[in-house]
Image: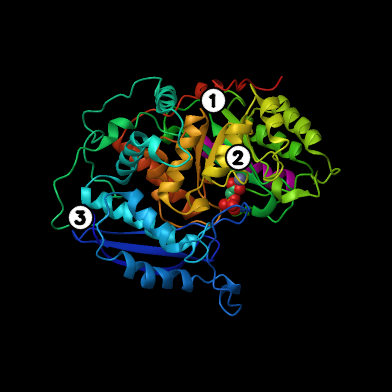
Amino acid sequence: MPKIKELTALEILDSRGRPTVRATCRLGSGAVASASVPSGASTGAAEALELRDGDPHRYAGLGCRQAVGHVNGEIHRCLCGTVFDDQASLDQSLIELDGTANKSRLGANAILSVSLAFARATAAESEVPLYSHFAEMLGRCRGKMGQAPGLEVASSRIRENSETFREGRPPTPNPNSHEFGHSPSKNVASKAPNARAPEPAPCSAIRRFPRLTINLFSGGKHAGQQLPIQDVLIVPASPTTVADSLVMASAVYQAAVRLTAAKYGQRWLTADEGGLGPPARSPEELFEDAVQCIRDAGFEPGRDVCLAVDVASSHFYRDGRYDLRSQPCSGSELIERLCAWTRDFPIVSIEDGLAEDDWQHWPALREALDGRALVLGDDLLCTNPQRIARAVQTRACNALLLKVNQIGTLSEALHAYLLARAAGWQVVVSVRSGDTEDDWFSDLAVGWSGDQTKAGSLTQSERLAKYNRLLAIEAELPLPIVDWPHVAEAGVRTAPPS
Ligand code: PGA
Ligand code: ZN
C-alpha cells in the first residue's frame, strides 16, 4: 500500500506565463512522480480557490509561493510516513487538513497537485499506465457508490448507464499491442526499485475512446472579447479513431486559418486555447464561417464534422439580462436564440448557454434543446457534487463539463462524475485555458471513459501534449471512439442544416 515518503512542490509557469504548482510525490517503495495543475480564466464563481500570493511585485500578484510552501511544509509534514489505502483516503486527508469548504486555506492548486502526483506515483508503484490506474479507481469507486455522501443513487442505475455508454462495436483486440496488459506507457513514471508485483491492469474496463471536440474560433475572455461568446469547436463526427479525428480537425483548422486571412485580413493569431479570433460581427457569422471551413476542407457539415459552442453566458449576464451586443435580452429570449442556432447550424452541444446563477431558466433550455443538442454545464456546475445534484434534481442540463481543478481533488471529481453518470448524463472531460505540458488529462479522459474531450485547438504545446498522449494511448489500446449516436440517443440532429 502506498506510503508517502516525501512531498515537494515547485512554482512553474502555465501556458499564459502565469505561475502554477507542480508537485512531486515520492512513495516508500521508491516510486516517484510529478504532476502540474492547470488554471482557468473564465472561471465559475463556485470553483475551489487557487491560492495566489497577492504580491503585486511578483507576477502581478499571481505568484504561487504560498501554495508551494504549503506542499513543502504543512502537507508534507502531516502526510509523510502515512500509508494510504487508496486515492480516496489521501484526498480525504487533504480535505480535512485544509478544513475549508473551498480549499482556500492551503489552496486548491496545492491540494490538487498532491492529489495528482500521488495518483501518478501509485500507478508507477503498481507498474500500470496512468489511464489504467484511473480506470481501476473508477471501478472501485463504482463499487462503493452507496457509501459516498450524496451518492445514494441506486447503483443498478449506475450500472445501467455505464452499460449504455459502453455499448457499441466491440473493441478489436490487436495481438501485437499491449492493450490488455502492461504497456511501456510514458505515464508509468520512474519504476519503484522494490515495487510489488504488478496487478492486472483493468484496461478491459475501457471500451471506447472519447470523441474529440476541438477549438476553432474563440471570443470572450479567451480572445480579447471581440465577440461575447467564448468558443466555437469542431466535433469530428465520422472518424472512429483519435488519429483520424486529428487529421480531419487539422484540415478544418487550416481552412480556418486561410478564411481568417482572406475574409478578415487577420494573421494567424491565436486565443488562449489556440482558437482563431476573427472579428466576426455576430456569433451567427462565426458559425457560418465555421461551416464554410468544414466545406473548404472537403467535409460535409453535420455529417463528417459538427459544431459545439461554449457560450460562457455568465460573463455577459448583468442584472438578469444577457448582453450579446445586439440588444440585452432575457433568459427566455436567449433560449430562443440558442434554439435558432441549433436549427440553422450543425451545433450538437451548447455549453453554459445560460449564466451560472440563472437556475430558473436552465430547465427550459434543456427542454428546448432536447432532441437538438447537449445542454452542457461548466460554470453552472463547477464539477461540484452539490451543484450537480441540484442540476439533476431540477433537470437543468444533461451533460457535465468535468474540470478536476474546479473542485480540487481527484476523488471529488470522481464523485461529480458518478453523479452525472447516475443521472444518465454525458461527461466531457476538459482542460483549462491556462494549462501546462503535463498530460495526465488524457489518461483521465480515457481511464474514466469520458464521452468527449475538450482539450483546445491543434496548436500550442500544452494542448498538443494532450492530443499526443491520446495518440500514444490509442497505440496501446486500439479501441474505437464513442459512437456519435451516443449523442443521438439524446436526440441530437446531425444532419446538415437545410
Ligand atoms: P477556463 O475556460 O479554463 O478559462 O475557465 C474554459 C471553459 O470555459 O470551458
Ligand atoms: Zn466553459
Q: Quadrant for the C terminus, please.
A: top right
Q: Residues within 10 Å of mark 3 (few under 14, many from 20)?
A: some
Residue 54, position as x, y percentages in the image: 58, 74
Q: Amino acid at mark 3?
A: Lys
Q: CA distance from mark 1 to mark 3?
A: 40 Å
Where residue 351 sits, quadrant-wise, is top right
Residue 255, position as x, y percentages in the image: 61, 39
Look at the magenta stretch and give its main secondary structure.
Answer: helix
Which element carries disc 3, helix, strand or loop?
Answer: loop
Q: CA distance from mark 2 to mark 1?
A: 16 Å
Q: Is residue 300 visible?
A: yes
Residue 303, position as x, y percentages in the image: 58, 23
Q: Is residue 256 part of the magenta span, yes or no?
A: yes
Using the image, tell me which numbered label, if any, was put on residue 191: 3
Question: Measuring 47% from the left and 24% from the top, which residue is drawn there?
Answer: 483
Q: Amino acid at mark 1?
A: Val
Query: Of circles 3 and 2, which is in front?
Result: 2
Q: Is residue 149 left or right of residue 81?
A: right
Q: Which residue is mark 1?
A: 487
Q: Between residues 115 and 241, which one lies in front from this camera angle?
A: 115
